[in-house]
Image (spheres, grey):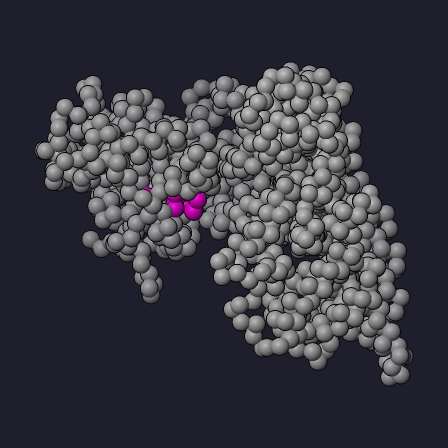
Amino acid sequence: MKKPRLPLESYTVGWVCALPLELEAARIMLDEHHQDPPREPHEANIYCLGRICEHNVVIVSLPAGRYGTNAAAVCTAQMMEKFRSIRFGFLVGIAGGAPNDEVDVRLGDVVIGQPKGHYGGVVQYDLGKIEIRGESRRTGYLHPPPTMLLNALAKFQAMGKDRSDYITSRLSLVKGVQKPKLDRLYESTYDHVGDSCSDCDSVRLKERPDRVEQIRVHYGTVASGNQVIKDGVTRDRLSRELGGVLCFEMEAAGVVNTLPCLVVRGICDYCDSHKNKDWQRYAATVAAVCTREIFDIIPAPQVTGVAADVDTRRRFEKMFMTDPRVERANLVTGKGARVDGTCEWICENELYKSWLNTDGPPLLWICGGPGKGKTMLSIYLTEDLERRMQIKGSGSDLLFYFCKHESDKCNSAKAVLSGLIHQIITKNPTLFRHANSSFDTDEKADYTLSSPEGLWAIFRDIVHDPEIGQVFCVIDGLDECDEESISFLGPKFQQLYSGKQGDHPSLGFRVAVVSRELHAMKGSPTIQLDPDFDEEINSDITLFVRSRVNELYRIDGFNSTLAEHVEKLLLQRSEGTFLWVGFVINELLQKTTCSELLASLDTLPKGLPGIYNRVLLKINEKHRQVCGLILCWVALALRPLTIDELAGVIHTEDSTLLDHDQSVLDQLALCRPLLRVQDRTISFIHESVREYLVMDNDGNSAVATLNIDWEEGHLEIVQTCLDLIENAFGKTDNPGPQRPPILNYAIHYWTDHARFARAYGDSIFNMSRPMFGGKEPVAYKWFATYMEDDLWTLGDSTLHIAARFGLTPWVRKLLMLMLKRKIWKFRIRSYVNYKGLDGCTALHRCVRRGHDATAQLLLEHGADINAKDNQGDFPMAYAISSGSVSMAQFLITHGAKVDIHNNNGYTPLAMACLIGRLDMVQLLIAHGAAVNRIGKHKAPLSAAAIRRADDIVDLLIKRGADVNAVDENGLPLDIAVAQVNTRMVQKLLSCGADPNYIDRHGIHILFMPVVHEDHEELVPLFAEYGADLNWSDSKYGWTLLHWAAYSNRDAAAKALLDHGADVFAKTSIGEVPRAIAMRRGHHTIVQMLDQHIERLQGGTAIIPS
């Protein structure tokens, strides 16, 4: 019989294996074999296609001779690229067991990866960091199996012994596979002897009790890595470090983050020196049979419910920046472990205890000054909440995020929201429905990831979801974000709980923000970290001082009397600042005698500024110039610099004995107490160091050379950057492979530094002339490199370039030069309004970047405030897309039109609605923007519905927006229904939206969500507002119930019946819903319809044909 050939998109399940014997075992499990897929040139993967139960399955095996996590990752990614409809999968094969006193893992048993502790079912044991004393710490995050597979696994587990017996009986049907007789586990310290275990000492075998069942299935953590474990001691050590893993293998860590899957492993050896291949075929077959049994549990219709397609998931994974647990561990490593007894006071704090309970405030603000122990308290909070959740069990989750001033990837509203959303959806994949529509195309994904408002809309929808359960969220260091992010997030968190009761998030969602004093958080329930007024908080600093003072006992002669004296003095002068104590103790530890220590104590300054001043004074005068240069660059750089980049701006003496890298590190060591180097990236040990360096110093001449004048420092950086660029591009066509790493920074940031040095505008103008000379090769090469050869910008004039970067002095000079030329004197408006290849004027360029001073200058010289680019977008459109309310206000004040539209029909108001900016919408409405559609313009209400912006929808309706206005995007209600946004659906229906809207194809508004997507929760909502649940299409006369019966949507059918759908309704050819369900073989719906008819008839049903 010829094998069937199915389209590639018909395959929805992936099965990954590594070895030929694993592939052979997988093939045996197929109920039906399909033709192989077309093979692409250079394709290395081996595919086998077929059907198991009701699922079309792709079995893929790694190419011969390739193994390990990297090979597995490449193989899986190629499979996912070829078979785009795969929703979930299995990684099935053999592994080495890791038996311990608690879990009796034996050869031929099966291990299935299941979330446990910190791990999602798989941990990569060879990815991590070696820390002090050689201890290892795992880094990176591996995804758990999707909820749908975990639910199936729970049912599989519930079968217990019956399932194991069934697997054993099923194995007996597989030809040529027999269970080996010998299962020997030796002591972990006993090494193998000879060619086979016949020479091994049987006395060293571990005694194990007899087992009744032949096969046992274990559930827990699978360890994955690129090393073959062949040593019992190493096996036990790694298992112990990882919290008790069940087996070791070499593929899972490369697969689970690409394919949402379950890892199923048959145990073929014990990862010791007695490892052999005797059990491999049997173990591979057991794992395959076990996987086949799980397939039986998963109904085919559920496949469509696994969150989203692969492309959407891939886009969503761009949200993942860092594992919060890794960041927490890094902070503990950098700051040191918490002193016993500290931070515990918060558990007795009444406000905190109230926050923990649903009857208390859901938003809590913990604030304190620099160095007051905020981050250590945040770490303790996350650990305390984890302990509480372990005691409580399931039903609650913890999210946390640590903002870092030294990382531009972790200190913005976008980073915070992306991190929180990714965490909560990873923990509860069903919540992905709130993000799905924002990631279903590359364009939407790029916009969402770049838009705080877009991310907030997703976050808000998630926390309003009634299924969210109890979630605690801790955000540390919000003050370390940029000002715009703080101004955005603070009010947003407060607004979550400030609306009407019905608009509140789930009461189980609680947020704690830990930061310095922030105006944006004023008015929130607050715990103030002030040791002077709070005895409990003061006890923390006392415990910390005592702990650190104990370290001084290493100095000869140090005794309890001295300890008491030092402790008292430190408490008096520390001003409750942990950071100050740490600095002082580190300095005292450098003393070799108690006399030196006491002399140093007499000169201790108060507070952090005094400490920083003291550190700077200790820098040798001959080193102050280079230290000043280093501190200036670290303080003023617009992103963290690496050692290699900083090496390009500091000069080291040539040495035949020291390499350049070591010379740079030696220079950095001069500033060691103030700087930290991690992963070759340089930052201050605390943000307060930067603040001290750039503030006005006290006139001390010894320190004045190291304090930083804000504008003068930026001027020096500009000069260095311009020299680097000219050296690279001004003398040769190709800067070559030896271009210094700092050059990339210079290319992209010198203009920003130039703006900060406003007082030196004329100087910057003169030194940067080569960058704006039209005939200067360096100018073209710099700008082309900056824009990465973006063709649309190659036609930009010098004025465009200067305006783009907000270089107002340059813009002014260029305009003055034009006015001096007779030919241009009366044509200045033409010069100012010259358009580049994309149709943008210089005003477009500066507005997009928010340079209001430059925009003001251009407008004064005749810039067209409503000029359109090739897409019909005007400067106001650029202000809106960049989210700058201040720029929008500026443009309106200077005459920008508020009801103009672009080529796609979007007005400024519709654009603001589309990006979800309530403040922008309020501004435009206040200045007369029409809330209803004009002509062919897009309806603002539809745009707000697309963005899921409930607050904007409320405002527009209050201002008179027509809820039934239809534009190319559709009816607002139709959009909300498609998104299953029940809150917005209810709002629109309650405000008069038509519950029986028929689209241009003659389809009822409930048709798609109820019949094709099984969103039955919308039925009672529409029924409440008068929807006709017996609507029938004009072509076939089918009602919604007919379509539900046809599509096997049993939940939707039940909802329709419960709310009055006519079970006896007939199509144009006289068929009732039951007849259609019978014809399609949907027996569950047939039974449901029969039961409903029986209830209606009060007894024996008369079944309609």
User: Which residue occupies 49% across, 41% down?
Assistant: 307
Q: Is residue 260 above or below residue 201?
A: below
Give 271 or 988, whichever is nearer the viewer: 271
**Image coords of residue 854 (percent x, y):** 82, 62
Toward the left, the furthest residue is 198
**Image coords of residue 277 (percent x, y):** 18, 41
Horizontal side, residue 1047 vs residue 730: left or right? left
Instruction: Locate the C terminus and report the quarter of the image it occupies.
Output: top left
User: Which residue occupies 42% across, 31% down?
Assistant: 115
**Image coords of residue 744 (percent x, y):** 60, 62
Give 531 or 358, whichever is nearer the viewer: 531
Give 453 or 54, whichever is nearer the viewer: 453
Q: Is residue 68 above or below residue 215?
A: below
Q: Is residue 445 magenta?
A: no
Q: Residue 584 falls in which quadrant of the image?
A: top right
Toward the bottom, the furthest residue is 823
User: Which residue occupies 57% across, 43% down?
Assistant: 435
Residue extent of the magenta highlight: 250-262
Q: Residue 974 falls in which quadrant of the image?
A: top right
User: Which residue occupies 88% across, 77% down?
Assistant: 819
Horizontal side, residue 1101 vs residue 918: left or right? left
**Image coords of residue 200 (percent x, y):** 13, 31
Q: How many marks?
A: 0
Q: Say whether residue 424 is visible.
A: no
Horizontal side, residue 288 vs residue 1099: left or right? left
Q: Is residue 391 above or below residue 423?
A: above
Give 239 or 646, whichever is nearer the viewer: 646
Q: Say whether residue 619 is visible.
A: yes
